[in-house]
Image: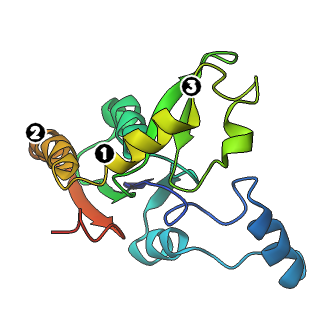
Amino acid sequence: MKNLWIFGDNNSAIFGKTKERRYFYYKHFRNGTFPPTWSELLAKDLSLTLKNLAVTGQTNYDIFDMFCRCAEQIKKDDIVIIGWTYVERFRLVDTPTNSFMSIRPNQFKSEHINIPSRLPEINIDIINTILNNRRNIEWCDEIYNWEIIINLLSKLIGFKVIYWTFDTNLNR
């Protein structure tokens, strides 16, 4: 059976697959169940096996990285849907855990950024400077260049690829 590959952020993720508080309340509101997400409905409608690798809070770097990690598993006639997130998001290495940490607008208040377990060597002013810089339209070219590579791989392997985003600057 062919696969439907989903890469993206919370707009593409399956309900409840993250630790977001809103999903806890939503599940409670729905008496302990979640409705199927658009990717689950689409996979069922197209008779495809769903491979949803979208994660809440992802940056485009995380999304592209996850695609690269899975690229060898994507086969001819699979469908790949990539939901790019907002270009302002970026990631830094959290040195206490040696893992990437997604940085999003309005994520930090100045009193929380310098908590030792969360980017102890990065000052909130640096974060805000980078976030402001990433509002420049030129950052979209980075994503468009990634799409060139993905499109080439799509042609070579024979899978279909679809891109979408809520970022009005990135959406062309």
Q: At label 2, which amino acid type do we have?
A: Leu
Counting from the top left corner in percent of width and height, residue 11 is at 50, 66
Q: At label 3, which amino acid type do we have?
A: Ile
Residues 113 and 138: in front is 113
Counting from the top left corner in percent of width and height, residue 70 is at 39, 35
Question: Residue at image x 23%, y 53%?
Answer: 136
Q: Of all residues shown, which one is farthest toward the bottom?
A: 30
- Measure the alpha-carbon separation of dots 3 and 1: 16 Å
Circle 2 SS class: helix
- Numbered label attached to residue 63: none
Counting from the top left corner in percent of width and height, residue 160 is at 21, 57
Q: Which residue is mark 1?
A: 133
Q: Which residue is mark 2?
A: 156
Q: Which residue is mark 3?
A: 122
Residues 42 and 67: in front is 67
Residue 59 figure quarter: top left
> Which callout, 1 or 2, points at the residue further toward the start of the chain?
1
Counting from the top left corner in percent of width and height, residue 104 is at 51, 50
> Which callout, 2 or 3, points at the residue further toward the start of the chain?
3
Circle 3 SS class: loop
Q: Is residue 93 above or below residue 86?
A: above
Q: Is residue 15 above or below residue 29?
A: above
Question: Residue at image x 57%, y 56%?
Answer: 106
Q: At label 1, which amino acid type do we have?
A: Asn
- Measure the alpha-carbon separation of dots 2 and 3: 42 Å
Q: Which image quadrant: the N terminus?
A: bottom left
Question: Residue at image x 52%, y 42%?
Answer: 103
> Which callout, 3 or 1, points at the residue further toward the start of the chain?
3
Question: Residue at image x 76%, y 23%?
Answer: 116
